[in-house]
Amino acid sequence: MTDFADNAHRAERAMRPLFPATPLQRNAHLSERFGAEIWLKREDLSPVRSYKIRGAFNAISKRVAEGQTRFACASAGNHAQGVAYACQHFGVHGVVFMPVTTPMQKIEKTRIFGGDAVDIRLVGDYFDDTLAAAQAYCADAGATFLSPFDDLDVMEGQSTVAVELLDQLDSPPDMVILPVGGGGLSSGMKGYFDATGVGVDLRLVEPSGATSLAAALEAGAPQTLNKVDNFVDGAAVARIGARPFEILRDVPRDHVLSAPEDRICHTMLEMLNVEGIVLEPAGALAVDVLEPLRSEIKGKRVVCVTSGGNFDFERLPEVKERSLRFAGLKKYFILRMPQRPGALKEFLGFLGPEDDIARFEYLKKSARNFGSVLIGIETKDAGAFERLFARLDAAGFPFRDITEDALLSEFLI
């Protein structure tokens, strides 16, 4: 066993006074649905509801042993909470820099976990400004900067997920599916599997709006994405970490999957409604790709790492909206409504018995022959829209489906 594996075992043992191993649970619903033995490694049930506590604990513990007592990080989410929890545990001082736009719920949770051991500073509208402030503070105060993923001690701490997983099963699984953001978790777990010679087939999942690992694998080196969709905030990283990529560079390109954000919302709601499991968007990534992997996983033992459950329920309406759109049960379109008596009644007659009007707004009122109307329809049958649009065409009601038009949707919906 290599130094990496030995260090992972030591880190895992050191964590036990802080929190017990997170559960590994066989999920009957997913197992039956996919004809496989599906297990969930419930990192959403850690003390801070994500695996980030592991890397923060390991990195801080090593630096405390070296005599360091001042730390800082830049984070608006799970890393901040993990650092705060670890600082409180070790009795050291931490400064957590967060963007000004950070939701109050995340600020309060970080404050609760850190108590008097942590100061929270809100700096900058964008994360780059927050990061610069944290690094400037470290330079001025002589504090240690704690990277969320591009740090060998953090990667080593995250590898303890793999240590626990193998201890909790009577034999290794056929496949492990885990999310990728900056690469700390995936590189840590892959590093442990490689070091121990355990033959586990890995599948790594990125959100479609932030495929930094895929870009790095195609180029042979980390690349900075020009644009990132921040919806899956726990994994929306523009550039994979340099250190994690050194371990991930030999991952086959077709073993890295991308998950569309709307489909992730559908998965989150299914897990909430069917299983009562609250997952944040990044925490649902591994479960989300079971469907496209259906043929590969049939009859196999598969572990999905549910990496986090820090979900702000103020986002639930947006998640539901995106889930309905993914399922084809909700659409928005702009209708050119004839400006004549009876036109609206005629349009309403085109709707089916299960079609509900969720939005109706005149975009332009004038004396012209037609007026533009923004309409949102929610239904229980995806095929209802094909029938509705056919009726509109036949009646000469011009319309434009803008459901997938990101620019118009941003301004109008």
Image: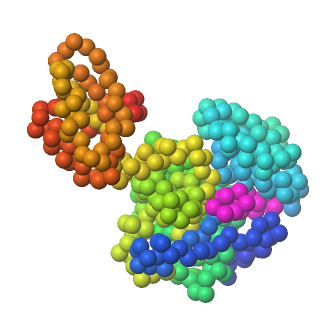
Classify residue 407 by image quadrant: top left
Q: Is residue 217 left or right of residue 295?
A: right
| Magenta segment includes 240 | no
Q: Is residue 288 left or right of residue 407?
A: right
Residue 283 image point, x, y percent: 56, 58
Q: Is residue 14 left or right of residue 402?
A: right
Residue 387 image point, x, y percent: 19, 47
Q: Is residue 100 left or right of residue 16?
A: left
Numbered label tally: 0
Per the picture, the main secondary structure of the magenta-coloured stretch is helix
Answer whether residue 138 is visible to the viewer in this image. Answer: no
| Magenta segment includes 47 | yes
Give the residue displayed 61% in from the left and 56% down from the top.
Answer: 309
Give the residue displayed 67% in from the left and 58% down from the top.
Answer: 49
Answer whether residue 271 is visible to the viewer in this image. Answer: yes
**Residues drawn in magenta:** 44-62
Residue 105 image point, x, y percent: 68, 42
